[in-house]
Amino acid sequence: MNQPLTSNQLSRKTGIPRDTCSYILGDCLGRGIYRCLNPTASSSRLYYLTEYGFELRKRFGRDDKVDIDSVDWNLYGWACFRHRTPVLKAVSELMSPPMIYHRLRMKNEKLRISRNNVTDIIRLLHQRGLIEQVYVKKHKHPWYQLTKKGQRIRELLLSAEVLSHGK
């Protein structure tokens, strides 16, 4: 683990089935190797190594750490849920909601999401301070871009994706 991950992200990264991965995480939590960064979350709980976990990792020759105090992990866990992640990853520049929808469809044709879903998720991301509205000349409706907080969470989501695909 180079950064905090959900059990689903860890499952994809390791190739271990999700239920088995959850069981192993529970066992490691009990042994003090991992800890949950957002224990009050009902879904998308994030796990990261404890100091003991890092000591074990050093024994295997790995010593990289993420500054876990620099991120709101409750917000990151919230962003890891269902359609929020792909929408957040799709916003890479100043974009309108239809542009975000088309980028989502181009990246993943099998993603089941409607234009209305995208608009609703944009509204939620805006309420949480991850994206901001920008009014562009000659356009009636606002366009959106990531805030600094949104950029940081997007970077973490993208790096978790790269890790999970073994790249």
Image (tube, helix red, strand yellow):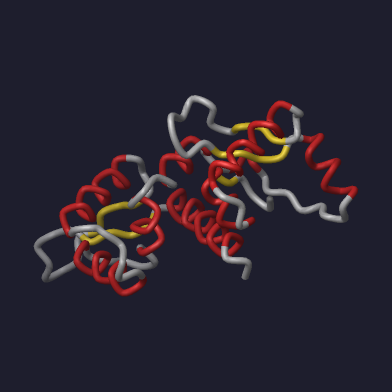
68 with respect to 43 (left or right)? right
The residue that appears at 51% across and 61% down in the rendered structure is 158
29 with respect to 115 (left or right)? right
Q: Is residue 70 above or below residue 30?
A: below
Residue 132 locus on image (x, y percent):
31, 52
The residue that appears at 62% across and 70% down in the rendered structure is 167
Residue 79 locus on image (x, y percent):
41, 45
Q: Is residue 150 above or below residue 37?
A: below
Q: Quadrant of residue 89?
A: bottom left
- Between 147 and 46, the one nearer to me in the picture: 46
Residue 108 locus on image (x, y percent):
34, 69
- Between 11 and 39, the one nearer to me in the picture: 11
- Between 59 and 87, the one nearer to me in the picture: 59
Instruction: Count how many numbered circles sit on residues in the image.
Output: 0
92 with respect to 100 (left or right)? right
Residue 21 locus on image (x, y percent):
61, 43
The residue that appears at 12% across and 67% down in the rendered structure is 139
Q: Is residue 22 above or below residue 8?
A: above
Q: Point out the residue furthest to the bottom here.
A: 106
The residue that appears at 58% across and 38% down in the rendered structure is 22
Q: Is residue 130 above or below residue 112?
A: above
